[in-house]
Image: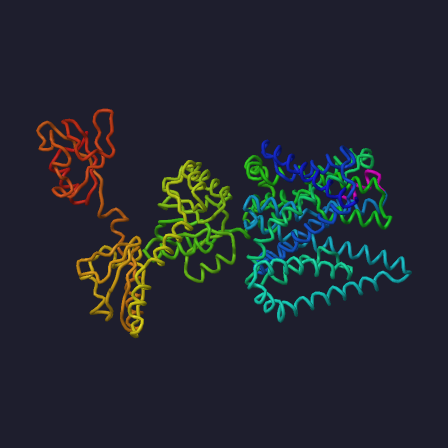
Amino acid sequence: MHGARTLYEFTAILTLAVLSGILSMGLRQPLIIAFLVAGVVAGPSCLGIVTSFGQVELFAHIGISLLLFIVGLRLDLGLIRTTGPVALVTGLGQILLTAALALALALGMGLDPLGAAYVSMAMSFSSTIIIVKLLSDKSEIDSLHGRMALGVLIVQDIMAILSMIGLSTLNYSLEQGGQAYLGMIFVALKGAGLLLCMGLLMRFVLPWLLKKLAQSQELLVLFSIAWAMLVSVVSDSLGLSREVGAFLAGVSLASTEYRDSIGSRLVSLRDFLLVFFFIDLGLRIDWSAVSGQLGRAAVFSLFVLLVKPLIVLSIMGLMGYRRRTSFLTGTSLAQISEFSLILAAVGTGFGHIDRETMGLITLVGVVTILVSSYLILYSEPLYELISRPLEFFERQEPYREALCNKCFILPRVDVVVAGMGNYGREMAGHLMERGREIIGVDFDPQALDFCSARSIPVLYGDMGDPETYEHLPLHNSRWVVSAVRSVELNRMILRHLRHLKYGGKVAITANNQREADQYYRWGSDLVLRPFIDAAEQAVDSLTAASDVLSRKAMSWPVVFRELRVKAGSAFAGHALRDIPLRPDAGVSVVAVSRAGKVFFNPDGNFQLFPADRIVLIGPPDDLQRAEEAVYRIQDDLAGEDGESVAFGEIRVSGASPFAGKSLVHLRFREAYGSTVIGIRRGDDYLIPPGPRETLEPGDDLLLMGSADAVEALQKTFAPAA
């Protein structure tokens, strides 16, 4: 009967969570708030339908463990190297200052010294669950402020865990009548032993074991969950807390090639179990215990929401960060942590604090989690609203985000590439191959180092920060290309460029057709779709000729090589007879694949086009030389810089030989080397005109053609008035 009762309760609270979530979506509110409300409604303060608090709490603990396991799984050692020192100083400084101010505030409000100490510690920590989830939902977890927030969270979590270890050790030592420091040393030794064991397993056992388990995805995922729970339980039995163990379990798998596969498959399970954490948080609110703490809760909630971000803002400003990065990082940390609630529960169990103090901390947690969710979701509009007063917190020269000067020595700039990840770097490399001058923009030090090592001009900056645009050479760039995948960031880029009245064109990278349609509506001139383009090239490869030829000549020691003709290749646009592959490289073109169709044994008149796939036959060394020749980019920018193409206007007079004749009859391109791309007839414009359009006296023609051809036409016929 008890099991059936628990099942009914779980069904009820999940149904409440779904209904609350539907209402929240309709009101465009965060789902986190919906789950908190569901917990409050299901709890003893409202409907009182839940009595299985232990089971809900168990699911919540599993959800927290999986969250920290995934955080550890995705821990980037480069992040520790680049942001570790700053995160350490910011995290420790914020904890100490927040705790000191909160302690003074608590004592001033009449709390006893021990209770005030617990409250001050609880106010110092921020919620890993809330921050990671909301920043991930906003695709900002890899932004500069997202990385800073994650670094600070790691410091906070370590300090919170050390605090719990210290309290547990102190309480155990006092109960046993021993010395506190001996117990703490013993716990520290156990922690060092756990770290040593994890290091040995990471080095000698886990890579081999995962390789074996990876033959079955189901078994790999099951092992990952079991590993997270096993290390969590071992850590808890050593007095180091379950959370520490779950985090270390993730770190132990972070260096393996399977971490992305594991993480992606655990996200849905993590999100489901985290629902129970928020429901459990709502269930914990006992209004009989917190009704007398409303005034104090309001004061401490304002303290966490306002003073805590200002502390982070001040520390990061002093350390040389721009006010935008500091503000967004501080806003992310404007709540108290799940560790704060655990810490309060530990204090209640030890008899250090009463139910009222526990209720105070819980109520502050609910309020700050609720309000900070909105602060994180709407941090950008909030920053734009108050950015000018925040100048007080920024150094005159924020040196940690100072832009490099490589771009300013370039005589001209063709393209600004935002986001120097894999796609952005490849794009920049191909643009440089074709003679374009580019500048890459990114805030990831690893990406910048990678680009600098390959002589790609880069500058340090965040395209979400309006101040970055002040340092970009937009005045002489023709394109701004965003290679990032965040819809919100791309929208900000378009908005900033529109505000600056940027005269060039903008290209945005989309993940799918829905995003592409959005970007066109928002004003993008071009939308890049790398997945669709890559899929098309993959199909071209699968339907190419090399496989057929290899099977036909399988009994002969013939070597084939298939190459793709790039858009800027020196061979693109030329007939095979004009391509000296046989005399210069000693190889022959035996087949050409184009749009899924294969042309075998093409003759000398066959013309190559960009994206064609050619199959060569010849000795391996000669094939290598031929590949270098095919991939060589032709350095011819005349058409790009405007020297070989021109626009001009002429007017059709009554005596003009053009009057009364159609465009198809005049054959402008063949006869005059130009194309009529527009006709202005009074107040009407015909763009483009139809081939049978008859020219009338008084028409103004917009011509496009070679500079010489357009100039000759303008000299022959009177220009438009």
Q: Residue at x 81, y 54 (%)?
A: 167
Location of residue 44 in the rendering, given as x and y in whole percent from the top left corner: 79, 36
Location of residue 59 in the rendering, given as x and y in whole percent from the top left corner: 71, 48
670 sits left or right of 486 in the view: left
Instruction: Tell me the chief SS of the magenta region.
Output: helix
- Name the image quarter holding residue 623: bottom left
On screen, residue 649 above or below 313: above
Q: Nearer the viewer, residue 126 or 6?
A: 6
Judge whether residue 306 can be spotted in this image: no
640 sits left or right of 396 in the view: left
**Residue at the top extreme of this rendering:** 683
Judge whether residue 469 can be spotted in this image: yes
**Residue at the right extreme of this rendering:** 177
Rendered image coloring scheme: rainbow
- Name the image quarter holding residue 385: top right
Quadrant (top left/top right/bottom left/bottom right) for the N terminus: top right
**Residue at the front extreme of this rendering:** 1
318 sits left or right of 541 in the view: right
On screen, residue 446 above or below 305: below
Which range of residues does the magenta coloring cover?
A: 102-111
Per the image, is 108 magenta? Answer: yes
- Name the image quarter holding residue 36: top right
Q: Residue at x 84, y 49 (%)?
A: 349
Q: Nearer the viewer, residue 342 or 16?
A: 16
Q: Nearer the viewer, residue 137 or 143?
A: 137
Location of residue 8 in the rendering, given as x and y in whole percent from the top left corner: 73, 40
